[in-house]
Amino acid sequence: MIDVAIVDSGGANLASLQFALERLGASSIVSDDPERIAAAPRVLLPGVGAAADAMRRLRASGTDRVIPTLRVPLLGICLGMQLLFEHSTEGDAPCLGVFRGRIEKLVSARDRPVPHMGWNTLELMGEDALLRDIGASDYVYFVHSYAAPVTEDTIAATRYGSPFAAIVRKDNFRGVQFHPERSARVGAKLLRNFLAL
């Protein structure tokens, strides 16, 4: 029995996610088979690259229809979190529509290049089991050019110029804009909390 199905959305971080889960004693598969994903006890939706390309891949496999119907814990990571929203301006891409809102490009400035790459702290805005033992002074690692707005579903935000959603939650769906597999001790805590859901 596997612990987690990792949706093969074409991202380059699949192996590092599997290694991070292995270090926590969890077994995983990488799949784009809707039946295998629907049968898993937990699902990770990672993503690296462009929203339009990732959505094309999800549509081609049929996983775009399965993901919004899941009732098990699902965690979107980076682009995977963005795909859970209604629309992305990156490639004018209709997305999965689990969360309300539109993904917009970050605004660059002389002291704020885009993509945003680096460590930021979280502004906690709600309570959730995913945040157990994670505090506002803890740093997590971001690599992204687009971001989700802060909405009623945001349970943690961060700031790069303007604030944006760093962690979102609605029912069994959660998303993180940062990379837990690259966020050292804090990222391992978050993945451990996800495995306990």
Image (spheres, rainbow, N blue to C red):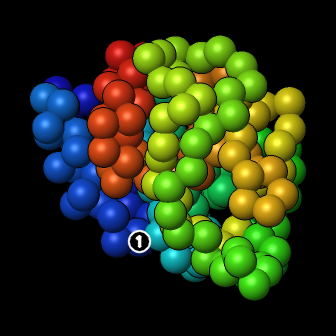
Q: Is residue 171 left or right of residue 29?
A: right
Name the residue: 48% across, 24% down: 134
Amino acid bearing label 1? Gly
Give the image quarter of residue 103: bottom right
Name the residue: 39% across, 22% down: 193
Circle 1: element type = loop
Q: Position of residue 188 (x, y in %)?
A: 31, 35
> In the rendered image of this protein, does residue 90 appear above or below residue 96?
below
Q: Is residue 124 left or right of residue 40?
A: right
Q: Position of residue 60 (x, y in %)?
A: 52, 71
Crowd class of label 1 (few under 14; some 14 to 19; many from 20; radius 10 Å): some
* Residue underneath mark 1: 10
172 vs 152, nearest the viewer: 152
Q: How many marks?
A: 1
93 vs 189, nearest the viewer: 189
Name the residue: 83% across, 43% down: 150
Residue 151 visible in rendering: yes
